[in-house]
Image (cartoon, grey):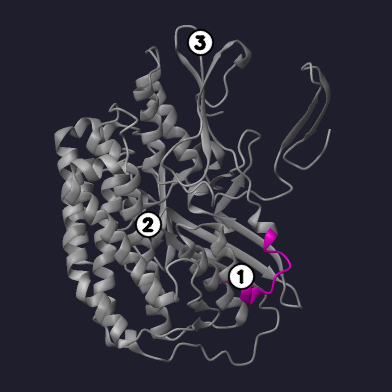
Amino acid sequence: MFELETAANPQKLRRVAIDPVSRVEGHGKVTLLLDEDRKVHQVRLHIVEFRGFEVFIEGRPFWEVPVTVQRLCGICPVSHHIAAVKAMDIIAGAKQIPPTAEKLRRLMHYGQILQSHALHFFHLCSPDLLLGFDSDFTRRHILTVAEQHPEIAKQGILLRKFGQEVIRHTSGKRIHGTGAIPGGMNKALTVAERDELRRDVDQMIAWSKGAVDLVKQMHLTKPAFYNRFGEFDSNLMGLVDERGALDFYHGGLRATDADRRILFDHLDYARYEEVIDEQAKPWSYMKFPHLRSLGEEKGWYRVGPLARVAAADFLSTELANQERTEMMAVGNGRPPHGTLLYHWARLIEVLHSAELIRDLLDDPEILGTDLMADFGPRQEGMREGVGVIEAPRGTLFHHYRVGEDDLVKFCNLIVSTTNNNQAMNEAIRHVARTFIDGNEVTEGLLNHIEVAIRAYDPCLSCATHALGKMPLEVDLVAPDGQLLSRRQRNMTGTAG
């Protein structure tokens, strides 16, 4: 059992709830159980919504899925679009798509990462970091940031706008585009579109570098606080290319322990079920993945900016790699594990994405028109595909099987936020233990817990749960409060 997950005598404890957790995507709440001395006995992050998208997909033609699954999320639809289409490439029989098609998908994906990271840092998290965790909560928002730091707010808005323009030119729309299809792309990039993006990209690189400098200055003001806030050891996971560099679009799975010792490397992600298990718990609609070889207690891991920047050997662009080297030095030979350092790593990824976008726009092949794979005869029995990418929030798995009629029979999604589920719970327990335990519970201290959650940029809307494994408890209560009947279903689906 994890520390502070379940109190011994919950009925005797005082309940404090943060409901809803604000400035995150989706809906969640945190509950704390305290004794009369305000000592913390239980802390849980609850995901209070159910999407069931894995079941919605069943029965649909496989070629529809890359567009359908975008509706999982309005913030990162491109991530689900590309992960799904990579799986459907395999089912369609396209072993390799043309180079231009892959570069256009990468361009779209880098635009997604840039706009999502900019939205998260400048709009959702900068109020805490620039105005203070304990500042007046009625003014702790982006409008006050715009009032007090207008240039920072402006750059954040324009960085996000640029990422959205990259998506529009590659997918046809800013949200829920249709650019990627099984076997390739259905839209080429025109010279005018390339030139429009190229005109602005150097400015985006400069602003991204400035954003990294900003978070470094914040760190310099209180290095011990930034390093220790929500600091705990964990395993790390991300995609790397054949050289060991971080690759957002494709590569092999790498997992390391807390000291960056390799647990597995360059693993074909189609084999993810051999190394990752998913556990359901009765108090959350979100699953708890962990590495099978280490088990539930020791096998949970972190994904996303800090985890993948630390797990990779280097970044493939010059400026971002220089910044990575500087950030990694904070750990004094170990990977840095402080939760607030996610912001530093995230802005390094903004810079990395902007540099990658520039390099692709300078590549003449990006204007090619050979966009579809030569499928050839479809192989019998090729009816299963796994697509994995590094989404803004971390490693994203899409796994499908189709029947002889080409309709989807099975879908399993492990979204980035789900991969970070245990890590987020550990972060809020660490912060609760540090700041809440024994202290007067104030709004400012409760905001410390929300700050820890926001650092992971969770998308709670995306975090699905497999229907049939969801525990349910239904009470029938009379108007006077008397319990008339109770029905329960456990995690195996057995009713009682």
Which residue is denoted by mark 3 in the rendering? 35
Task: State the image coordinates of residue 151 (x, y, percent, origin top left).
Answer: 17, 51
10 Å crowding of disc 2: few (<14), some (14-19), many (20+): many
- Name the N-terminal-most of marks 1 and 3: 3
Residue 402 locus on image (x, y percent): 70, 72
For label 1, the residue is 65
Q: Residue at x 61, y 70 (%)?
A: 65
Say if mark 2 contacts mark 3, CB within 8 Å: no
Identify the magenta region: 56-66
User: Which residue type carries mark 1?
Assistant: Val
Question: Of helix, strand and loop, which one carries label 1?
Answer: helix
Mark 3: give few (<14), some (14-19) or many (20+) Cα within 10 Å.
some
Above or below, comparing residue 325 to residue 43 in the picture: below
Would you call the spot at circle 1 few (<14 residues within 10 Å), some (14-19), or many (20 or more)? many
Q: Earlier in the sequence, mark 2 or mark 1?
A: 1
Identify residue type, mark 3. Asp
Residue hosting label 2: 116
| C-alpha gap between disc 2 and disc 1 | 22 Å
| Residue at disc 2, secondary structure | helix
Q: Dividing the image into 4 quarters, which one contains the C terminus?
A: top right
Q: Please indicate whether residue 486 sits to the left or right of residue 420 in the image.
A: right
